[in-house]
Amino acid sequence: MEDERQARRRAYQERKLERAEEEQRNLALGNPGDVDFIGLVRAWRQENVPTGPAQSMASETSTEQPKICICVRKRPISEKEKSKLDHDSITCISNSVWIHAAKLRVDGITKYLDHSNFNFDHAFGENSSTEDIYQKTVMPLVDYVLTTSGGRATVFAYGQTGSGKTFTMGGIQRMVVEDLFMLMEGADDYGKDEDDFILRSSKTYVSVSFFELYGGKVVDLLNEKRRLQIYEDGKGEVVVSGLEEFEAQDADQLFQLMERGNALRTTHATDANDTSSRSHSVCQINLRSKNNSKLMGKLSLVDLAGSERGVDTKSNNRLRRAESAEINKSLLALKECIRALDTTTRNQNNGAAHVPYRGSKLTMVLKDCFTSKLAKTTMIATVSPGASSADHSINTLRYADRIKEKKVRR
């Protein structure tokens, strides 16, 4: 019996040493946290993830941009998460996203992983760059707006506060500006046919408006944050009264205007993020005819306010809780409007699909992006990789999945 006791003690000491060594290896790899859960995630990946760079890149799909394109971006684990000993709990494989939620069985001791899987048009892992996302999801929209008279394209960045959506949108804004002017000038330089390239720099000018929706109020970020009013006229057109448009002569001028708008956005510290975006920002790039200023096309870049669960706002003051309630209400209305863009629904109703754009001010100001037959939409859902954010990441992916639900099933 004494020999058995000594053997158990030796086995325990060996296991303790192995765990300490494994913990040091995990720290060296930048993935601290519970050794057992990290081991379970690693074992799952070894069994299910193909070797090579394909595991973190989006799958190759058709070059034709769908009416609704949904993609997911997983950012690298942050230093703040490492300091909390938070481990990586999300895996991107081709166009699928897997969340490995850490759980304990009823005995309170045995550890296991609860795997949740979602499929989208694209899934970008931590090794993917913003340029990868832009080329697959946003660049086709720039081409579409420039080659389609009256085309409307909208890009949304949605996700938990702190998940990297504002960072992603900032990179996309810069690339859109560069490509927009390059393509318009190239249409003249290379003499493309009118049918191939309707909007060109010799016939079209570019203007931008930039406003935010915060706490039920709409303010112009490029015009001293003046308060704006939203009306719907007798023809059913939504008018943002007082919104200023600024013409941009080149890419640098347009980008400077966008940078100025971004710098004036409303942010506040929350439990989840020290500089959380508390407003929805809408940057509208308008393409107008030089002859009569008629709107020929529009590209809207929308950086949504960071979503939060009720548990994330428990220590917030009344104002912060009211902000979160208003944000969640507008996000719900947005989801229903994007789903209404589904082609099948539109055909079943002979082109008269109901779009509930009056559900919030956000959806009202974007009405033409939802109701136009020439509208196309991309949503980029961003997720945090930390295990402590697993529940929130699942909520983000469910939101994106329900938007795509009708298209996936047809």
Image (spheres, rainbow, N blue to C red):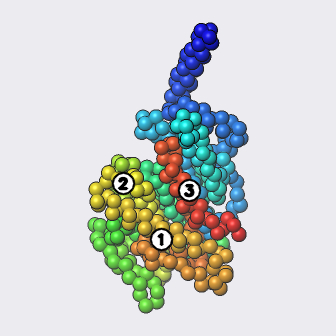
Near mark 3 (Cα within 10 A), the count class, few <14, some 14-19 or many ≥20, is many
Furthest residue to the front?
Answer: 1
- Residue in view at x 40 percent, y 52 percent: 311
Rendered image: mark on residue 170: none
Name the residue tied to disc 2.
Answer: 313
Q: Where's the N terminus, which quadrant? A: top right
Q: Which of the two discs, 2 and 3, labels the residue nearer the N terminus?
A: 2
Name the residue tied to disc 1.
Answer: 333
Q: What residue type is labelled 2?
A: Thr
The kind of secondary structure element at disc 1 is helix
Front label number (2 vs 3) = 2
- Residue in view at x 52 percent, y 33 percent: 34
Task: Decide which of 4, 62 is in the foreground and name it.
Answer: 4
Looking at the rendering, which quadrant does residue 398 occupy? bottom right
Q: Which amino acid does label 1 sit on?
A: Ala
In the rendered image, residue 258, in percent from the top left (x then y), is placed at 40, 61
Q: What residue type is labelled 3?
A: Leu
Is the residue 312 above or below the residue 62 in the image?
Answer: above
Near mark 1 (Cα within 10 A), the count class, few <14, some 14-19 or many ≥20, is many
Real-space Cα separation, disc 2 to disc 3, in angstroms:
21 Å
Name the residue tied to disc 3.
Answer: 397
Drawn side of residue 119 relative to residue 355, left or right: right
Looking at the rendering, which quadrant does residue 266 occupy? bottom left
